[in-house]
Amino acid sequence: MTVALPIVVGVLWYGRGFLIPLAITGLIFILASALVDRIGDIRLLGWSPPVWLAHLISAVMIISGILFFGIVVSDSAANVQEALPRYQERLSLLAGQLETILGPSIVDAVERGISRIDLTPWLAGAASQLGGALSLVALISLYLVFLISERTKWVAKIPRMAATKQGAETATKILHRIADGVKQYMWVNAVTSAMSGTVAFLIFSAIGLDFAPLLAFTVFVVGFIPNIGAFIGVALPCLVALVQFDSFTPFLIVLFGYGVADQIIGNIIQPSMQGRSLNLSTFMVMVSLTFFATLWGGIGAFLAVPMMVVVMVVCAEIPATRWIAVLFSSDGKLDDEDSSNTFP
């Protein structure tokens, strides 16, 4: 175990360019499976969609969402680049308004710092990251198309990789537990994040906030990040409103209008939809968030909880690593306490 940990960390770090698209594809695939289940449950005058149609609708919706996200990010890049000089000038004006509060010496220092900011390297880096993000979106879309097309084959062949019948049964059980846990998490967060993103877009558009589509998508994405995601989703548009407008009214609308709506969604609607808890320790969720964000950046924060669920389920089935699953759990109790189907 002591030797394996550095190896795992090294693989996650040096292989992040290869592993991140696969991990995101897996999570989106699980979300697509949850969407298939919901579509299959639809009843219209006694008719329900066949399985193939549910898969087709799910694939079209997911891939369209991914491509739409790429289009919004691409279109917003030019707007952000155009607005940066204006925002820089606005920051200088705000610094002048704060002179009476902070004193002239502090404000002069802030103005000198703003005037020395060179946006060229930042824009070059942002353009490079944007190109990488669009390439990542294209790669994930390709992965997803082929994975969905081979879904039934993968479900059948993974248990056959085990050497014994008992191992195959255990592998099947592990896959089902991982799918159930991650599917529940991804579905609930997707629905509630979509609610938050929709409310955010309506409010941001109503007040004329810059980059409203991009900020709304940001709200949707950070909704998957536990604990700090809600703070980011409110703080970022509030900062844009504070810098963009001369009046504090838009800032207050974003802070209280969207902020209150987001709290209602996060603290009332989401718990009622979540139902069965994932039984994860809040402290260990933060540790996982820090760990994966350190290794994989912002995408790692997005993947932290699903990856934690996978690790917890797998470790629970191996006696030597069962203590890790107990450590990750909220109450120290695992779902399979009475199960004897564990790996030797």
Image (spheres, grey):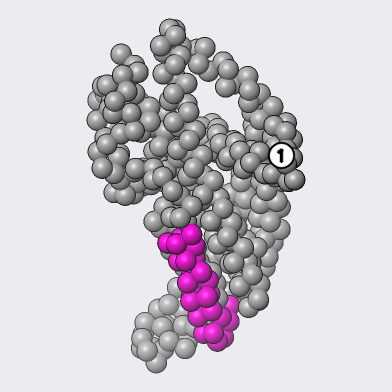
**x, y percentage for residue 27?**
54, 38
Q: Quadrant of residue 178?
A: top left
Give the side of residue 13 with respect to residue 201, left or right.
left
What residue sits 53% from the left and 56% below the top?
192
Give the side of residue 138 with respect to residue 236, left or right.
right
Element at label 1: loop
The type of residue carrying mark 1 is Ser
The C terminus lies in quadrant: top left
**x, y percentage for residue 190?**
55, 50
Residue designated by label 1: 48
The crowd level at tag 1 (other Cα within 10 Å; few <14, some 14-19, many 20+) is some
Pick the residue in front: 250 or 53: 53
Boundaries of the magenta span: 243-269
What residue sits 42% from the left and 28% below the top?
11
What residue sits 51% from the left and 44% below the top?
186
Give the side of residue 64 with respect to residue 336, left or right.
right
Which secondary structure class fits the magenta region best?
A: helix
Pick the residue in front: 284 or 86: 284
